[in-house]
Image (cartoon, grey):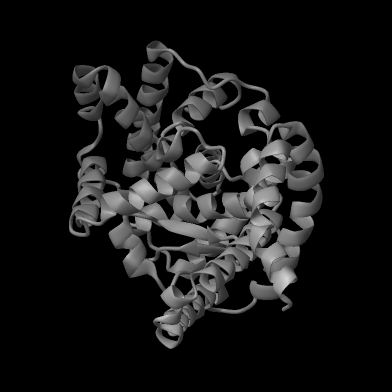
């Protein structure tokens, strides 16, 4: 690559950033021309290209990338410092290419219209509305727990293997797409991450690889979490970047399944978010409502807590801080707190649309 061209490529990241931020000020245009225009075409192409491969191509790509970086550092050694201009040029070119591909293949979805605006409901809620929704969730969760175990003291066990969970997740999306056309999902590409153990130590249930459009699932986590995690990552895959939006979609899709184990898994996850929010505003009421749960449901919550506790480590907060900063730099002002923002979506959706308790 000629010297002038290398310099241009290295500095091209600056106009790219300006262009992304400028376009991001017009979410309606991003929605029309990217999220509902170019992105579905690119996404389907990548899922068609990589979805049939039984292992994660994206994870292999990241492995090769890290090894290549280590080799680069080893081979160049002192030259990194002896030729700082050339080193910075290489770094600039790499970042420019990565930034361009990231935003072309997926990243512009961070600037699309919020999902509540698409569906036409607000996200604010009162304490009374939260309590009402939480109590109804407890009621149905207890009901399903007894249906599935025939004993209020027995915890629910998901009887499916990972491939069956994936298939039922796809079925859930088919059901959801009959009501919400934007949730149509074809050419599946949902895979177990080969980095499930590192993801667990980092505190993550999965992720979307934006370069291959593969939805990655951490298969080490308890099975009770896998239905909503799988549906959550597909939510990212079909173009929703906000963590609150993909939580909402994942829980809605899982609840809309024809399978009671999936309904239980969804409500179990929903209630966790609701109780967390309730604890912040009324600790005593939180305890009262939690104690209304069947013993079997409480055991399920205790098992989840024990699982994550054994993987706690000093680096986890660092990874969370990095991800929080990444989200905030990509138009997600709440950072990792946006996960819990799903409560506002759920409460208002329940109030306006969802006949929750049969």
Q: Position of residue 223 (x, y in %)?
A: 36, 59
The answer to whether residue 82 is visible is yes
Q: Which quarter of the image is occupied by the N terminus?
A: bottom right
Q: Is residue 89 left or right of residue 185?
A: left
The answer to whether residue 247 is visible is no
Viewer-side residue, 278 vs 326:
326
Residue at coordinates 68% horizontally, 46% vertically from top-left?
183
From the viewer's perspective, is residue 328 above or below residue 84?
above
Q: Position of residue 295 (x, y in %)?
A: 20, 40
Which image quadrant is residue 115 in?
top right
Viewer-side residue, 212 vs 298:
212
Q: Position of residue 221 (x, y in %)?
A: 33, 60
Residue at coordinates 19% horizontally, 25% vertically from top-left?
287
Residue at coordinates 70% horizontally, 74% vertically from top-left?
3
Residue at coordinates 54% horizontally, 19% vertically from top-left?
351
Viewer-side residue, 198 vs 282:
198
Which image quadrant is residue 45 in?
bottom right
């Amino acid at each position: 690559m000629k010297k002038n061209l290398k310099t241009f490529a290295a500095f091209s990241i600056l106009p790219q950033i300006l262009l992304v931020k400028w376009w991001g000020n017009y979410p309606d245009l991003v929605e029309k021309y990217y999220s509902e225009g170019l992105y579905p075409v690119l996404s389907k192409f990548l899922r068609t290209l990589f979805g049939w491969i039984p292992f994660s191509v994206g994870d292999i790509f990241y492995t090769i990338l890290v090894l290549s970086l280590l080799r680069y550092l080893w081979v160049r050694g002192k030259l990194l410092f002896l030729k700082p201009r050339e080193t910075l040029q290489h770094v600039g070119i790499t970042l420019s290419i990565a930034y361009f591909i990231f935003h072309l293949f997926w990243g512009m979805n961070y600037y699309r219209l919020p999902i509540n605006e698409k569906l036409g409901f607000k996200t604010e809620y009162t304490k009374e509305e939260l309590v009402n929704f939480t109590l109804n969730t407890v009621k149905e969760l207890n009901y399903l727990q007894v249906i599935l175990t025939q004993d209020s003291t027995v915890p629910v066990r998901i009887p499916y293997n990972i491939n069956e969970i994936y298939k039922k997740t796809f079925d859930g999306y088919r059901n959801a797409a009959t009501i919400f056309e934007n949730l149509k999902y074809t050419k599946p590409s949902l895979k177990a991450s080969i980095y499930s153990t590192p993801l667990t130590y980092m505190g993550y249930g999965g992720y979307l690889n934006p370069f291959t459009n593969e939805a990655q699932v951490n298969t080490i986590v308890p099975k009770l979490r896998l239905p909503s995690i799988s549906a959550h990552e597909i939510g990212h895959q079909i173009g929703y970047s906000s963590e609150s939006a993909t939580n909402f979609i994942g829980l809605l899709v899982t609840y809309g399944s024809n399978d009671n184990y999936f309904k239980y898994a969804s409500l179990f996850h929903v209630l966790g978010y609701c109780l967390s929010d309730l604890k912040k505003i009324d600790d005593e009421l939180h305890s009262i409502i939690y104690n209304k749960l069947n013993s079997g449901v409480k055991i399920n919550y205790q098992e989840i807590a024990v699982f994550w506790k054994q993987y706690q480590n000093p680096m986890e907060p660092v990874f969370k801080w990095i991800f929080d900063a990444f989200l905030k730099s990509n138009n997600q002002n709440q950072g990792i707190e946006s996960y819990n923002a799903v409560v506002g979506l759920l409460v208002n959706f329940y109030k306006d649309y969802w006949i929750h308790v049969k």
